[in-house]
Structure formats: C-alpha cells, structure tokens
Amino acid sequence: MNLASMSVAQLRKGLDAREFSALDIMTAIEKEITHDAAHAVPINAFIELWLDEAREQARAADTRLAAGERAPLLGIPLAIKDNLNYRGHAASCASRILAGYRATYTAHALENLAHAGAIFVGRTNMDEFAMGSSNETSASGLVRNP
C-alpha cells in the first residue's frame, strides 16, 4: 500500500479504520518528495516545504483521532498553491516582485481546510501570478511533468 498515491477518500477510510496513522501518511509523502528532489532533473513542484510543522500537525491529528474526534480532512496532508496566503508563511505568487513577503493573514479557503483538519505540507510552484497554464513563467523555475 503506497500511502502517497492514495486518494483522499482512501486515506480518510484508512485513518478512520486505524489501518495507518496521519504520521504514516506524512512519512510516505515526505519520502516521495525527497525522492523527487534527489533526481537529476527534479519535478520542482514545491517552492517551500513545511515538513517539521506538518509532522507536528500529523501527530496532533493522530491524538485527536485516537480520542474519537472526526473531521472530513483530519490527518490528510495537502499542498497549498503559492497564491494563497497562510499566516506567517511566505507567499510569492511565484514572482520575484513578492520575494520575502510573509502573509499577515490566512486565506478563508485555507481556514476552512484547516477547520476540516487538513495538514499543510508546503506551497507549490505555479505560473507567476497564476497567469499561464504551462508552469514555465515561475520565478522558482520550470515545473516538469513526470
């Protein structure tokens, strides 16, 4: 069973059945991301990773699940597109213009995801200011489709 390739529905079902933990999922995702970065030509999907923070959130999710708490995304890791603000974290819209900007608030969509129990793994690369569809205009470099 490859946790990193399971759907959200499969992960939810497995977490609820205690077949694996949120920390197990994070470990699998981290291994997949690290494996990609080790390639001669990495995919370059992530601009920034918050793996320590995500592992901490996964441990907290496991504690909440063990206590019987249920939420639609509790323990499910998600990546954030770089045009969504997450308080205290960088948000550049893949542009040099916003290099160094740190969000002073969390986007409402992310607040809803967090309320549903989602774990945020990092921010993903994109076309600068989301203007394009090929991911070739990012200040963080080209994203390669494997």
Image (cartoon, grey):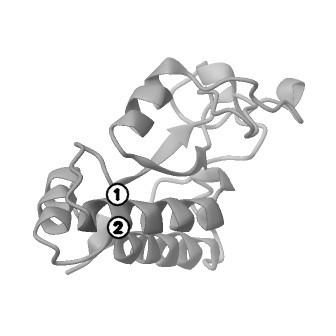
In the image, residue 62 above or below residue 129 = below
Residue, far front: 67
| Image x and y of residue 122, in percent | 59, 51
For the residues bearing labels 2 and 1, Cβ distance under 8 angstroms: yes
**SS at mark 2 in the image:** helix
How packed is label 1: few (under 14 Cα within 10 Å), some, or many (20 or more)? many
Location of the C terminus by quadrant is bottom left
Q: Which residue is mark 1?
A: 75
**SS at mark 1 in the image:** loop
Location of the N terminus by quadrant is bottom left
Q: Which residue is mark 2?
A: 62
- Please indicate whether residue 136 sits to the left or right of residue 68 in the image: right
Between 126 and 75, the one nearer to me in the picture: 75
| Image x and y of residue 55, in percent | 53, 68
In the image, residue 128 above or below residue 11 = above
- From the viewer's perspective, is the residue at label 2 or at label 1 nearer? 2
Q: Residue at x 18, y 56 (%)?
A: 12
Q: Residue at x 33, y 38 (%)?
A: 116
Q: CA distance from mark 2 to mark 1?
A: 7 Å
Q: Earlier in the sequence, mark 2 or mark 1?
A: 2
Q: Residue at x 84, y 26 (%)?
A: 98
- Please indicate whether residue 69 sits to the left or right of residue 91 in the image: left
